Amino acid sequence: MKVAVIDDEEVACRHIKRVLEGEGFEVEYFLDGHSFLQRLTHSFFPIVFIDLHLPDMNGMEILNQVKRSFEEVEAIIITGHASVEGAVDAIKAGAYHYIAKPFKRHDVKLLAEKARKKIELLEENRALRQALGKEGSIEGFVGSSPAIQEAFAMIEKVALVDCNVLLQADTGTGKQMAAKAIHNMSPRHNNSFVAFNCGGFTEELIASELFGHEKGSFTGATATKIGLLESAAGGTVFLDEIGEMPLTMQVKLLHVLQERQIFRVGGTKPINLDVRFIAATNKDLKKEVEAGTFREDLFYRLNVVTIRLPKLTERKDDIPLLITHFIEKFRLKFNKQTSKITHQALEILNHYNYPGNVRELENIIQRAVALADGESIQVRDLPADLRKLAMTTFEGEDLLSLETLEKQHIAKILDITGNNKKLSSEILGIPLTTLWRRMKKYGLGKP
């Protein structure tokens, strides 16, 4: 990443250049403002160090010109202790931070690295937003990984062929979304799409819901009811968790698939059926057939084409894209300003295993957007069990207590401002009396 240094003291310029080139930056320095601005017409510098006091112009003029032309540039103001107030004004005008002379090697490196991370995160968010516009032709799905693109290709192909489909997929991977996409791209798209979950219901309830019933067919049947299969005439029926369907009900479903007819519960008149069946399961139905819990003939009737939807752990490249998609979704829903995620929070989410797949990620982001106070989702906005991942995710980083971090931050601001307590309290955003109490608590000189 290119860095420009504008300072009339060549010793200071050479010092910054030497430090940052050792960190992999490409550095050019300029001893006056005009030579820098002339160079800026031919070359872009994402990071600039600007001395407030130059022989030919004021550093604020350079900052304003840079920000007018390149809003994304991160400017770091160089100043002496006597000019800290001017540096604060520069920050209000759009500078990223400031550094006071004589500056330490560590401070130069730290500020440049922080500016670089901020720029890279903004570029990553921009790239993700652009990618969202290219998420593919499968409605509702977001992803560009090879695993999900392979599933997309299968969905597009099978949608045009009027055959039964079996979706092999874990909970939370988007089974119903995939079934609906097949329906929406099929010749049946103008007719109904009906979904039914086969798990957790008795055979009697499943039969009544799918086939309907005649008036008086059982106690409580006070009127004739049209079943879901009949209501989907000309359309698509999605049977989720087909592996949970009772064996006796599997026999009835097999008859429907073979004869394309149904009988309402209590009815004697056959009703012709024109629907397409899409079934989904997170079980290995071949093993269920071997175990005797799923009918082999029904399995082959349903399994004309199998589409496997990948787990989120098999498409981890899509996690940042999905996060950006969900942030935008819930930002609008909750009317929040939150539009991005910090690098640390993103790293934690990238390292999680997601037993609940995409649905779990969506719930995590929904919660985080609801809790977020500012523009970015922070680590503190993630669930407690995820925050524990920070212990292993950021290896080599010191994991400090909140008190230690506060003490270090206050000490740093006091050092930068030359122990100017009034200015330090303004920068920290706390009352002067609170700063005095913190200084006494942490033994940071005399209040």
Image: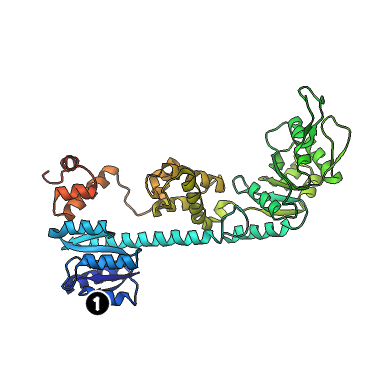
- Judge left or right: residue 340 versus residue 226: left
Foreground residue among 107 and 291? 107
Number of numbered markers: 1
How crowded is the residue under tag 1: few (<14 C-alpha within 10 Å), some, or many (20+)?
few
The quadrant the C terminus occupies is top left
Q: Residue at x 76, y 51 (%)?
A: 164
List the single residue furthest toward the top.
219
Residue 270 against residue 141 in the figure, above or below: above
- Judge left or right: residue 341 versus residue 152: left
The quadrant the N terminus occupies is bottom left
- Judge left or right: residue 33 versus residue 115: left
x and y percent of residue 65 in the render? 28, 68
Secondary structure of residue under mark 1: helix
Give the residue type at disc 1: Ser
Res. 292 visible in picture: no
Foreground residue among 20 and 435? 435
Res. 163 visible in picture: yes
